[in-house]
Image (tube, rainbow, N blue to C red):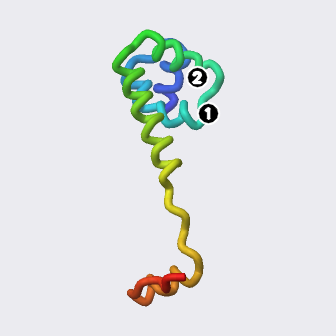
């Protein structure tokens, strides 16, 4: 992230700042001041709140529906081009 964006966010973020920083906001990677600035903006901007909610729901969906990695036998079978044995 550029220092210009971060300095602007610390003062008063605009929509483009929020959309660029929403993932860092969700991950807790922003400073307290930056988080509060984003939160302030979200409390007043319906389009950004919708965007944030969409991103949050997408992250939750991906987390909830993540596939577990194959076990060793499944991986070997897949690498050979076959199907894993049904157990």
Q: Label 2's element?
A: helix
Q: Quadrant of the C terminus?
A: bottom right
Residue matched to label 2:
35
| Label 1 CA crowd tier, 10 Å (few <14, some 14–19, many 20+) | few
Q: Can you identify the residue that label 1 sits on?
A: 28
> Which residue occupies 54% across, 33% down?
26
Q: Where is residue 34, by image quadrant? A: top right
Give the camera-side residue of 35 and 44: 44
Question: Is 8 or 18 nearer to us in this picture?
Answer: 18
Mark 2 and mark 1 in contact? Answer it, CB < 8 Å.
yes
Q: Residue furthest bottom?
A: 80
Secondary structure beneath label 1: loop
- Please say if 10 is above or below 60: above
The spot of residue 75 in percent (x, y) is 51, 80
Mark number, residue 10: none
Residue at (48, 42) in percent of width and height: 59
Q: Name above or below for residue 63 compared with residue 8.
A: below
Q: Residue reaching furthest left?
A: 47
Q: Position of residue 78 (x, y in %)?
A: 44, 82
Residue closer to the observer: 50 or 32:
50
Residue at (40%, 32%) from the top-left corner? 54
Q: Name the side, left or right, on which 43 lies relative to 54.
A: right
Q: Is residue 85 above or below residue 32?
A: below
Q: Earlier in the sequence, mark 2 or mark 1?
A: 1
Q: Residue lying farthest top? A: 44
Distance in Å between CA atoms under marks 2 and 1: 8 Å
- Residue 45: horizontal and vertical position, in percent? 39, 13
Residue located 59% across and 17% down the image: 36
- Image coords of residue 68 (percent x, y): 55, 64
Q: Residues within 10 Å of mark 2 (few under 14, many from 20)?
A: many
């Amino acid at each position: 992230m550029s220092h210009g964006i971060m300095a602007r966010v610390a003062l008063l973020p605009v929509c483009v700042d929020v959309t660029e920083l929403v993932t860092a906001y969700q991950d807790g990677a922003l400073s307290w001041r930056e988080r509060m600035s984003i939160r302030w903006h979200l409390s007043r901007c319906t389009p950004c709140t919708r965007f944030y909610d969409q991103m949050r729901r997408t992250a939750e969906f991906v987390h909830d529906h993540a596939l577990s990695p194959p076990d060793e036998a499944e991986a070997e079978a897949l690498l050979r081009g076959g199907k894993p044995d049904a157990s």
